[in-house]
Image (tube, rainbow, N blue to C red):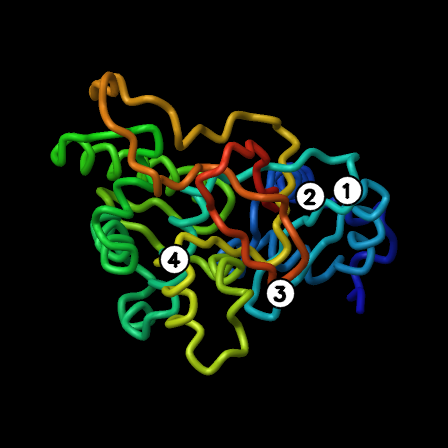
């Protein structure tokens, strides 16, 4: 129900907070209760804005966990595509978010804890292959350094979408929108355990697989060559996962990262 103060759409558009909020949503930003003014505006004007964004081929989605985002349903607004590395990092962050200790810690974790979570769930070798997909043989020290660099890049991209906040040093504050990465396992008796199994098997899941992105910027390439490591004249390892996703599907679909040559990427909100 639209509350008093926004009798019509024009009142919403004239709100001084609306232009920045609108741009953030169109760029794929998730808005939660920590965005106090924006979250209140969306709650007060939800009816008007739902109709407004439908004209642009988008749905304004409000999750019960306490966040909003734009879901493109047509081709009027471009979509941002997350690499499989970003998806894996997002799922690992969701696992940390679901851990009981996260509440006690005020949602704070470190990037080193994130890397440790990935290594625990996937195994060190699989983690290195996931973030070094073009490496046929690697130096352990260089490979681990590359993993940390790629995870850091993924975290920065996810921060831009409102999934985490970057705090001083390597600290992260986890935000409710991370639960999008856990949506396919919600309602199960042990959602965190099932999500960990998906990550360990090299599968990535996103609830509805699309993220708005009006800026059209480069989201980075998790497969980019690391100039610090020589890849010549090495034997191939057959089980290296590719860094692209199959086509994004309906809510709850699980997408496998495979070793094929398909370059289709999964859409993200």
Is label 4 or label 3 in front? 4
Q: Are marks 4 and 1 in contact (CB under 8 Å)?
A: no
Ranked by sequence position, the earlier of labels 4 and 1 is: 1
Name the foreground residue: 22 vs 190.
190
Percent from the top left, x then y, of residue 239? Answer: 35, 43
Q: Which residue is mark 3?
A: 63
Is label 4 or label 2 in front? 4
At x 44% / y 37%, what residue is drawn?
Answer: 243
Percent from the top left, x then y, of residue 75? Answer: 78, 36
Q: Are marks 1 and 2 in contact (CB under 8 Å)?
A: yes
Q: Are marks 4 and 3 in contact (CB under 8 Å)?
A: no
Residue 131 sits in quarter: top left
Ranked by sequence position, the earlier of labels 3 and 2 is: 2
- Cα separation, mark 1 vs mark 3, equals 26 Å
Name the foreground residue: 35 vs 156.
156
- Cα separation, mark 3 vs mark 2, equals 20 Å
Q: Secondary structure at mark 1?
A: loop
Q: Which residue is mark 4?
A: 201
Q: Are marks 1 and 3 in contact (CB under 8 Å)?
A: no
Percent from the top left, x then y, of residue 27? Answer: 61, 37
Q: In the image, is 6 to the left or to the right of 245?
A: right
């Amino acid at each position: 129900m639209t509350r008093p103060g926004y009798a019509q759409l024009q009142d919403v558009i004239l709100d001084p907070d609306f232009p920045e909020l609108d741009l953030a949503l169109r760029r794929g930003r998730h808005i939660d209760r920590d965005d106090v003014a924006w979250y209140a505006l969306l709650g007060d004007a939800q009816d008007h804005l739902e109709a407004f964004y439908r004209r642009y081929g988008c749905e304004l989605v409000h999750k019960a966990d306490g966040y909003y985002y734009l879901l493109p349903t047509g081709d009027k607004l471009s979509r941002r595509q997350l690499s499989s590395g970003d998806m894996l990092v997002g799922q690992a962050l969701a696992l940390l978010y679901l851990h009981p200790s996260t509440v006690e810690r005020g949602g704070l974790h470190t990037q080193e804890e994130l890397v440790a979570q990935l290594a625990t769930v996937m195994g060190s070798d699989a983690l290195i292959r996931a973030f070094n997909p073009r490496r046929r043989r690697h130096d352990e020290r260089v490979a681990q350094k590359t993993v940390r660099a790629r995870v850091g890049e993924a975290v920065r991209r996810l921060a831009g979408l409102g999934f985490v906040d970057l705090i001083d040093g390597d600290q992260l504050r986890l935000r409710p929108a991370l639960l999008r990465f856990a949506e396919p396992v919600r309602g199960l008796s042990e959602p965190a355990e099932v999500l960990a199994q998906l990550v360990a098997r090299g599968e990535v899941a996103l609830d509805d697989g699309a993220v708005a992105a009006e800026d059209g910027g480069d989201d980075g390439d998790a497969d980019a060559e690391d100039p610090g490591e020589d890849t010549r004249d090495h034997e191939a390892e057959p089980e290296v996962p590719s860094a692209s996703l199959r086509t994004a599907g309906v809510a709850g679909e699980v997408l496998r990262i495979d070793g094929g040559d398909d370059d289709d990427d999964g859409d993200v909100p």
